[in-house]
């Protein structure tokens, strides 16, 4: 069996990625981008009296696929499938973290 | 009868219940996680350290200094510090209007205010931590009746 280890393999919509709509705030231009969405459980203030349960939404995408003019406060609409139902969820881009190896992590804020 | 420390904590819960921003989302010593959808904006109240020393020998009485922690939590995409300051205002006014905690304490004072934020969740969450020093007295033989 051949294993595809190219970066493209992880960002195929036939595998882990979904097609999101990215609107650049400064120009209002909208782009379709392929990204892997994740929304892991996150416990805030676990060192204080009562932790707060929430989640930590991020998308991972190829750095080369970032839209031109991308910046904080751009809008990202992510199709999320839960119980076989897909619906769009709107996020604001808050932190753009390039790993320097061709992949960028984008931390999101739910709207 | 319950310990005066418990009576003070419960009275502060009563004082902080029904405030404009946090309403009935007031939790007495909540040990488990808060759910933003159900519990925020909200308040958690608990007691922490208490020091005590003999005040009189006959009858034997203790003067105690109790730390009461009042934590306000809020989640919002904007103006979260304003919300925390509003929660602080409402709590301080409520306790300031009854500094003797319904006659159970000799005095109370706000000794510190801390504010923390995190942006790691799906929306920013803020935490306000007010520490009150509550001074009260009991007989050595009866910790359930304030003196």
Image (tube, grey):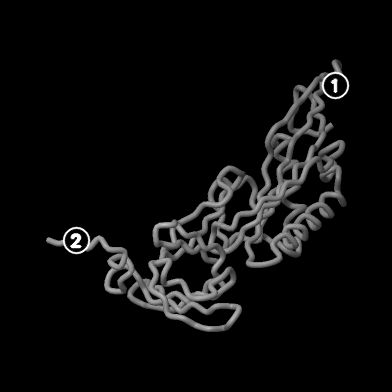
In the image, taking residue A26 as reference, residue A19 lies left or right, namely left
Q: Is residue B84 above or below residue A68?
A: above
- State which quadrant residue A15 falls in: bottom left
In the rendered image, residues at marks 1 and 2 fall on the same chain: no
Q: Is residue B62 visible?
A: yes
Q: Residue furthest top?
A: B57
Q: Residues within 10 Å of mark 1 (few under 14, many from 20)?
A: some
Q: CA distance from mark 1 to mark 2?
A: 78 Å
In the image, taking residue B1 as reference, residue B111 lies left or right, namely right
Instruction: Please report the residue visible at 65 percent of the width from the left and 48 percent of the height from the top.
Output: B28
Q: In which quadrant will I find the C terminus of chain A?
A: bottom right
Question: Disc 2 sits on a residue from what chain?
Answer: A
Instruction: Please report the residue visible at 59 percent of the width from the left and 58 percent of the height from the top.
Output: B119
Q: Is residue B132 above or below residue A110?
A: above
Which residue is more in the foreground, B59 or B74? B74
Picture coordinates of residue B88, whole percent (x, y):
77, 55
Mark 1: secondary structure:
strand
Which residue is more in the foreground, B89 or B113? B113
Instruction: Please report the residue visible at 40 percent of the width from the left and 73 percent of the height from the top.
Output: A80
Q: Residues within 10 Å of mark 2 (few under 14, many from 20)?
A: few
Q: Is residue A37 visible?
A: no
Picture coordinates of residue B135, whole percent (x, y):
82, 34
Label of residue B7 in the image: none
Picture coordinates of residue B120, whole percent (x, y):
55, 57
Which residue is more in the foreground, B5 or A33? A33
Q: In which quadrant will I find the N terminus of chain A?
A: bottom left
Picture coordinates of residue B112, whole percent (x, y):
78, 42
What residue is shown with label 2? A3
In the image, taking residue A33 as reference, residue B92 lies left or right, namely right
What residue is shown with label 1? B55
Mark toward the viewer: 1 or 2:
2
Question: Disc 1 sits on a residue from what chain?
Answer: B
């Amino acid at each position: 069996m051949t294993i595809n280890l190219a970066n493209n393999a992880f960002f195929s919509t036939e595998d882990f990625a979904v097609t999101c709509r990215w609107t650049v705030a400064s120009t209002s231009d909208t782009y379709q981008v392929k990204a892997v969405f994740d929304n892991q459980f996150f416990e805030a203030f676990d060192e204080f009296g009562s932790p707060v349960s929430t989640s930590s939404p991020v998308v991972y995408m190829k750095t080369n696929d970032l839209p031109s003019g991308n910046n904080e406060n751009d809008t990202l609409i992510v199709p999320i499938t839960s119980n076989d139902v897909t619906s769009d969820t709107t996020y604001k881009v808050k932190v753009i973290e390039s790993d320097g190896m061709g992949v960028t992590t984008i931390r999101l804020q739910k709207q | 009868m319950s310990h005066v420390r418990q009576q003070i904590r419960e009275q502060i819960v009563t004082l902080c219940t029904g405030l404009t921003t946090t309403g009935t989302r007031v939790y007495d010593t909540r040990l488990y996680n808060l759910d933003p959808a159900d519990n925020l904006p909200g308040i958690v109240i608990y007691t922490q350290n208490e020091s005590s020393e003999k005040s009189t020998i006959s009858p034997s009485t203790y003067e105690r200094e109790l730390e009461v922690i009042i934590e306000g939590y809020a989640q919002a995409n904007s103006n979260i510090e304003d919300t925390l300051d509003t929660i602080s205002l409402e709590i301080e006014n409520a306790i300031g209007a009854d500094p003797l905690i319904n006659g159970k304490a000799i005095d109370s004072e706000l000794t510190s205010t801390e504010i923390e934020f995190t942006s790691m969740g799906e929306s920013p969450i803020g935490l306000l931590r007010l520490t009150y020093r509550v001074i009260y007295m009991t007989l050595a033989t009866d910790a359930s009746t304030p003196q």
